[in-house]
Image (spheres, rainbow, N blue to C red):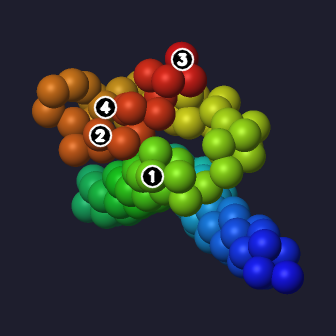
Amino acid sequence: MAVWTGFIARSQKRINQNMQAIKIWREISKNKEKIFSSHEKLFLVDNYEQAILVYKMLESFYEDSRNFYEILCYSYVNGEIGKKYFKKMYKDSLKDFIENSINKEFYTEPTTKYTYTIKVYKKFK
């Protein structure tokens, strides 16, 4: 009975961790929507001040996404997310995000603050 209880507890823990990863992934998806919307707004502005404001909003959304990826990768490295699940769900999007010209400068070593993201990116590359 104790073995079964331990198995159930470990299974529940893994489910909870993967659910947390899904919540973070949803936040990344919301940020993508905000980024696309802001890009559209950028084409509609009619003065420099508005353009700067929209640009700052865009950069904020990108930074939020970089931070969300860092949290996900931290969880992956520390075994808080299932390895197979993580690789299947996030490998391609992580690679695309890091290699995007807008983000590339933030992942330059040795100055990057996104060390877990870089570690996972190198592993999947």
User: Mark 2 belongs to which amino acid?
Assistant: Thr
Q: Is residue 72 above or below residue 96?
A: below
Q: Nearer the viewer, mark 3 or mark 4?
A: 3
**Among the two numbered marks 2 and 4 on one chain, the one whose residue lies closer to the N terminus:** 4
Secondary structure state at the residue bearing disc 1:
loop
Residue plotted at (47% across, 33% down): 120
What is the crowding at mark 2: few (fewer than 14 residues within 10 Å), some, or many (at least 20)? Answer: some
Q: Position of residue 71 (x, y in %)?
A: 44, 58
Q: Which mark is residue 53?
A: none
Per the image, the residue denoted by label 1 is 78
Most foreground residue, 103 or 3? 3
Q: Nearer the viewer, mark 4 or mark 1?
A: 1
Residue plotted at (74% across, 46% down): 85
Q: Position of residue 111 (x, y in %)?
A: 14, 33
Per the image, the residue denoted by label 4 is 107
Q: Which mark is residue 115?
A: 2
**Among the two numbered marks 3 and 1 on one chain, the one whose residue lies closer to the N terminus:** 1
**Among the two numbered marks 3 and 2 on one chain, the one whose residue lies closer to the N terminus:** 2
- Tell me: 106 left or right of 77: left
Q: CA distance from mark 3 to mark 1?
A: 19 Å
Secondary structure state at the residue bearing disc 2:
helix
Residue plotted at (66% across, 30% down): 92
Q: Which mark is residue 125?
A: 3
Q: Nearer the viewer, mark 2 or mark 1?
A: 1
User: Mark 1 belongs to which amino acid?
Assistant: Asn
Marks 2 and 4 close (CB-CB < 8 Å): no
Q: Is residue 63 above or below residue 91?
A: below
- Tell me: 83 left or right of 47: right
Q: Residue furthest top?
A: 125
Visible residue check, residue 109: yes
Q: Is residue 63 above or below residue 118?
A: below
- The quadrant of the image that shows the N terminus is bottom right
